[in-house]
Image (tube, grey):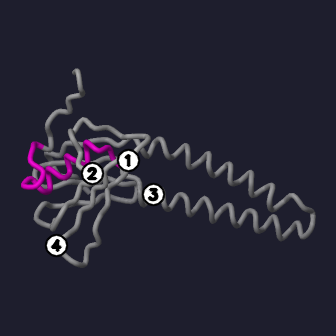
């Protein structure tokens, strides 16, 4: 599928930080499961089967959640945005959007990922009742403000493609 022309892409560093965490957490779970399931010789064959079955199910569940929730990059162009996830690309047109909420408000497009403290929540609701609302919470706050400006310029005035100026720069 060819992506439309005139799209400006904004990357998201968060998934690349969580992927090693996912693998490390999985290895810790693997070690704990090894201790729990295989520490006693009683019913050893059943415990080995349960250990590997739970390991496969656990890794599969963690990977499925990771793939469905992580945003790789966001493209903004004119009156539309594209959200590139590991599981596919979402196309959102301005005329399809009923409302956008950005809570708490974001100050500037230069706001980066906050690794601690509260970040804003971006919720997009559609005019069509068959489409569920979308929450884009795992992208930098500055990109959330750009998305809100592109899809609802009346409520969030400003250029969604303005250059990010860091304080003192």
Which corner quadrant holds the C terminus?
Answer: top left
Dot 4 corresponds to which residue? Answer: 127
Q: CA distance from mark 1 to mark 2?
A: 9 Å
Q: Nearer the viewer, residue 88 or 123?
A: 123
Dot 3 corresponds to which residue? Answer: 67
Return the x and y of residue 60 as percentages of the image width and height: 58, 62
Q: Nearer the viewer, mark 4 or mark 2?
A: 2
Return the x and y of residue 99 as percentages of the image width and height: 17, 64
Q: Nearer the viewer, residue 144 or 42?
A: 144
Q: What residue appears at the point 32 percent right and 56 percent down from the top-left corner?
A: 136
Mark 4 Cα-neighbour bin, 10 Å: few <14, some 14–19, many ≥20: few
Secondary structure of residue under mark 4: loop
Q: Earlier in the sequence, mark 1 or mark 2?
A: 2
Q: CA distance from mark 2 to mark 3?
A: 27 Å
Q: CA distance from mark 1 to mark 3?
A: 23 Å
Q: Residue furthest right?
A: 41
Return the x and y of residue 71 as percentages of the image width and height: 36, 51
Residue bounds of the magenta highlight: 139-159
């Amino acid at each position: 599928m060819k992506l439309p022309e005139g799209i400006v892409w904004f990357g998201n560093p968060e998934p690349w930080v969580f992927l090693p965490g996912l693998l490390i957490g999985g290895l810790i779970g693997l070690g704990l499961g090894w201790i729990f399931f295989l520490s006693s010789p009683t019913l050893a064959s059943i415990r080995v089967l349960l250990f590997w079955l739970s390991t496969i199910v656990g890794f599969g569940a963690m990977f499925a959640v990771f793939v469905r929730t992580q945003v790789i990059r966001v493209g903004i162009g004119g009156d539309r945005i594209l959200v590139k996830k590991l599981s596919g690309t979402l196309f959102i047109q301005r005329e399809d959007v009923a409302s956008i909420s950005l809570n708490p408000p974001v100050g500037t497009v230069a706001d980066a990922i906050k690794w601690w403290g509260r970040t804003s929540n971006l919720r997009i609701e559609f005019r069509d009742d068959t489409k569920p609302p979308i929450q884009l919470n795992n992208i930098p706050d500055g990109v959330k403000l750009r998305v809100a400006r592109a899809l609802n310029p009346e409520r969030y005035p400003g250029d969604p493609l303005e250059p990010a100026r860091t304080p003192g720069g």
